[in-house]
Image (cartoon, rainbow, N blue to C red):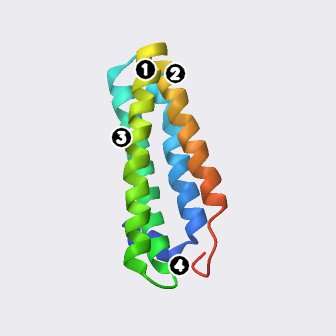
Amino acid sequence: METGTASWSRPGRQAVWAAVVVAALALPLLLVPNLVAVLLGMVLVGVGTFFAQAITTVFVGRTAMGDRAAASGLYLASYYLGGLFGAWLLGQAFDAYGWAATVIGIAGSLLLAALFAVQLRGSSL
C-alpha cells in the first residue's frame, strides 16, 4: 500500500502509530548476533520511520490553514535537523556505550515519535 493511500484511508494518528509499531517491533532484531537479523531489523526500522515521516508530511499539508508550503517546509527542516542531531547523538552513544545503547536510543526516539503522534490534531484525523 502506498503512503498516500494509507494516509487518506486511516486517520493520521493511527497510521503514524502503526508505522512506529513496525519500527519498534524490529528493535529486538538489532540485538541478535546475526548479520541477516540485524540487517532485517534495520530495514524494518527504516521502513517504519520513513512511512511515519511521509504520513506526517501529508498530515501537515492537509492540516495547515494557510501557507501550506511554509508549514511543509518548516516540518521538513525540523525533520532533517532532528535527524542530523539524532544521528550525532546516537553516534556518541555508540562510541561511549556500544551497540545496545544505540538501540536503546532508537527506542527512545520511537517513543518520542509515538508521544508526538498522540498530539496530532485537526480535521484530517
Circles 3 and 4, Cβ within 8 Å, touching? The answer is no
Q: Could you classify mark 3 by the number of other residues whose Cα lies within 10 Å: few (under 14), some (14-19), or many (20 or more)? A: some
Q: Which mark is residue 94?
A: 1
- Front position in the image: 48 or 111: 111
Percent position of residue 121, x then y: 64, 72
Secondary element type, mark 4: helix
Q: Which mark is residue 63?
A: 4
- Front position in the image: 115 or 39: 115
Q: Residue at x 61, y 82 (%)?
A: 123
Circle 3 or circle 4, nearest the eye: 4
Q: Amino acid at mark 1?
A: Phe
Q: Amino acid at mark 3?
A: Val
Residue 56 visible here: yes
Looking at the rendered image, the quarter that the C terminus falls into is: bottom right
Percent position of residue 117, x then y: 60, 59
User: Looking at the image, is mark 1 or mark 4 earlier in the sequence?
Assistant: 4
C-alpha span from label 1 to label 4: 38 Å
- Front position in the image: 33 or 102: 102
Residue located beneath label 3 in the image: 43
C-alpha span from label 1 to label 2: 6 Å
Disc tally is 4
Residue located beneath label 2 in the image: 101
User: Looking at the image, is mark 1 or mark 2 earlier in the sequence?
Assistant: 1
Q: Amino acid at mark 4?
A: Thr
C-alpha span from label 3 to label 2: 19 Å
- Front position in the image: 70 or 34: 70
Circles 1 and 2, Cβ within 8 Å, touching? The answer is yes
Q: In which quadrant of the rendered view does residue 37 lie?
A: top left
Is residue 32 depicted above or below 68 in this figure? above
Q: Residue at x 54, y 41 (%)?
A: 109
Secondary element type, mark 3: helix
